[in-house]
Structure formats: C-alpha cells, structure tokens
Image (spheres, coloured by chain):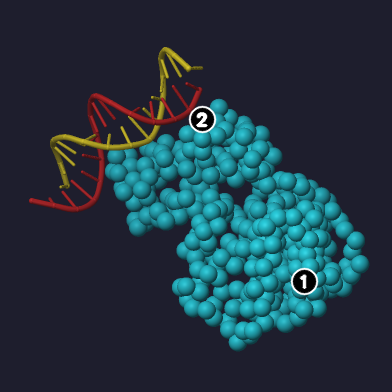
Chain colours: A cyan, B yellow, C red
Amino acid sequence: MTFICHCGHVLKIVTLIKLNNLDMATNLTDRKKRIVIVAMPTTMLLDVAGPADVFARANVTVESMKGKSEGYKIEIVSRDNSDIVRMQSGAGYICNTLESAEGEIDTLLVAGYNIEPEWQNKNQFLEWLKKMSGETRRIGSVCKGAFVLAEAGLLNKRNATTHWKYCRELQQKYPDIKVDSDPIFVKDGNIYTSAGISAGIDLALALVEEDFGREIAITVARELVLYLKRPGSQSQFSILLADQEAGIEPIRNLQKWLPEHLDKQLSVEDLAEKCSMSPRNFARIFAKETGHTPGKYMEILRVERARRLLEESSLSMDQIAEKCGLGSADTMRRMFQRHLKTNPVDYRRNFRTALI
DNA sequence: GTATATTACCGCCACT
DNA sequence: CCAGTGGCGGTAATAT
C-alpha cells in the first residue's frame, strides 16, 4: 500500500499499527478491547500516534502480566472513506475506512485536526458518532476532536475541554457545554475530552489505568519515557512520586491532599499539624515512608505542576509561580535551574504543546 | 552575583 | 530492654 512519508518514524508507526490490525483480524475470540482512533485530515501525527503507541505499549506490558488474550486491538479509521489520511506535516496514515469499523468497539477516540477540511460525508459521520456513543463503552477526543464530538451533540450539558487556545471558541459555538480550560483531560460519564495534542497521551494513559490499574499505566509511561503522567484533574499523585506511597494512613492522606493545595504556603510544621504529629517526628516518618524529606517532596510536586502549566497554558511566569506555591517567578526560576538545569522560559519554548 | 533572614534538616538524647 | 516519639541546637539549604 502506498503512503506519503517524510521520515522513518512515521513509517515505523504505520507498520506497527498495520500489524496490530492484522492481529485483530486473525484473532477474534480473545478478550482484547477494541480501540478505534478516528484520524482527521490535517491532524498532527502525535494526535493519533500518541494514544496508539500508549495502547500498543500497554499491550506488551499487559500480555506479559496477564496473558495474550488481554490488552487492546488498535485500529485507525479514516473519517472520510479514504484509506489514507493526509496530515498537517504531509505524512500519511494508512487507515481503515469508516465502513470497516463495524462491530463492537470498546473505546472510540476522535483525534484533532488543524484546519477545517473538506467535509463531504459530514452528516454520515456525525450520525455514525451518535450511534457509536450509545454502543461503545467509552468515547473520547484529542485536542480539537472535541469540536467533532460537540457537533454530534455528544458534549451537550457535559464537562469538556479542548486545546486551551480553542476553549473559548468551543464555549461560544456550543454554549451548552461546560468547557473547562484548565485540566489536561476531562471525564464526564463515558465521554472523555483531552487538551492539546500531547494530552491525548495522558488521556490514553488514564484509560489504560482504568482498564488495567495504575501500575501498568505507570510502566507504560516510563517505557515511553514520558517524564510524567499528568493527572487529568489535579487530585492524583505525581508519577515521579508514584511508587512512594506511604504505608501509614495520615501520611498517605497527606500525599493525596498536597497536590490539590500546592498554591498554599505550607511549612513542615503545618504539615506535621495536619498529621497530628510533632514536626520532628513527622519529618522523620515522612522521609522514611516516601523517600523524600517533606520540603523536597513538595518541591518535586511544585516543579511538576509548573512544568505542566508551562506546557499547557499561556499563563505568565508570575501566575504559574503563584499557582504552584513557588512564590515568585524568581524563586521558580532558581528551582527550575536546580531540578531541570534550565529556566522556565526556555523550558516553555522547548516543550510547549501549543503548536497549532 | 552577593548578603542576610528564614526555613529545613538531622544528630543527639530524653521520655514514654 | 525495645521501638516509637518529641524537643533542642547546630548546620545546610533556600528565599528575598
């Protein structure tokens, strides 16, 4: 089959996905969950490949732990009836056409797109989406894919998000949606929407976590060398600290409480108070349980949060420092220098996902 | 980059 | 005796 390809990486991904499709066709009796990703014309490679790779990596991990009958069947489907989707970069995906997506789907993801393209089979596609929303266990979007779900009416009265740059537009165009621009992804019932591009990876990781547990999701994240699995809401553990969950109740509670209150100025003494311990004893036990002193632990959380905001938002340095409890942009810069050997401005320039 | 103030950390010892 | 706890004070790290 022909495809347009500008780099070896794309070729590899196409091959991987194709193999998965073959695997699916020859093995219909297993209990694998069928993942269908709808590729939009002018999508970015990462929109589709990110989630696909997460599920593909999860397969390796899951199979080694639970056997070959578990895991995912990954399928990429063209929104149009073409079997090639031309992306923004000019590279192409080999896809199955919409018709081939008949049958039971476990999870349906709609990837984002760059510009509103020719849309010949719009109604047919939206009808199909509506039908699927009643049949599939989960349905989700990456980036501007949320607009497609919205157009099909799937997001009405629901909480949702999209690329931060388009949140306002989404809200204006579809007033019934409760658009939240802050989270990486939003779950409302069985509908999942995620923010800009790389957030699709986070969403996929969250779905893997839902299906097979946190441990496997974290393993996948690490294998993909994702530095952190950013929580959709802001209430979960950091991936850097994920395996340091304390065995002692009050400390564990504190670990859950901390990420949601990073903006507060918290001294070790305050934390000790929260655990009803003396400062000395608290610091000692905390370090023993988590592997980090309380101060270092909070620092790690704060830097992680700051990184997320630098990547995913357009907030100013001061605003980010404020939200992360880092006091001032100056303090944040020093802390970045210590932890990441770079400064926040450079970091944002290099890692911002707002590429569109 | 430096100087000063503040906070965190940790060894030590006493107490339960 | 022990294991866990808490207070003190010096030192190191960090904020401003």
Which residue type does callout 2 highlight?
Arg
Q: Mark 2 points at which residue?
A: A334
The quarter holding residue A328 reads: top right
- C-alpha distance separating marks 1 and 2: 52 Å
Residue lying at 78% horizontally and 61% vertically, measured from the top left: A4
A279 to the left or right of A228: left
Q: In this view, does A48 lie above or below A305?
A: below
**Residue A264: which numbered mark, if any?**
none
Where does the image place residue A229, in percent across and percent down from the top left?
Answer: 55, 54
Chain identity of mark 2? A
Q: Name the residue under label 1.
A: A1
Where does the image place residue A180, in percent across and percent down from the top left?
Answer: 70, 51
Q: Is mark 2 on a helix, strand or loop?
A: helix
Q: Are marks 1 and 2 in contact (CB under 8 Å)?
A: no
A316 to the left or right of A60: right
Disc 1 and disc 2 on one polypeptide chain: yes
Residue lying at 73% horizontally and 46% vertically, measured from the top left: A355
Which residue type does callout 1 highlight?
Met
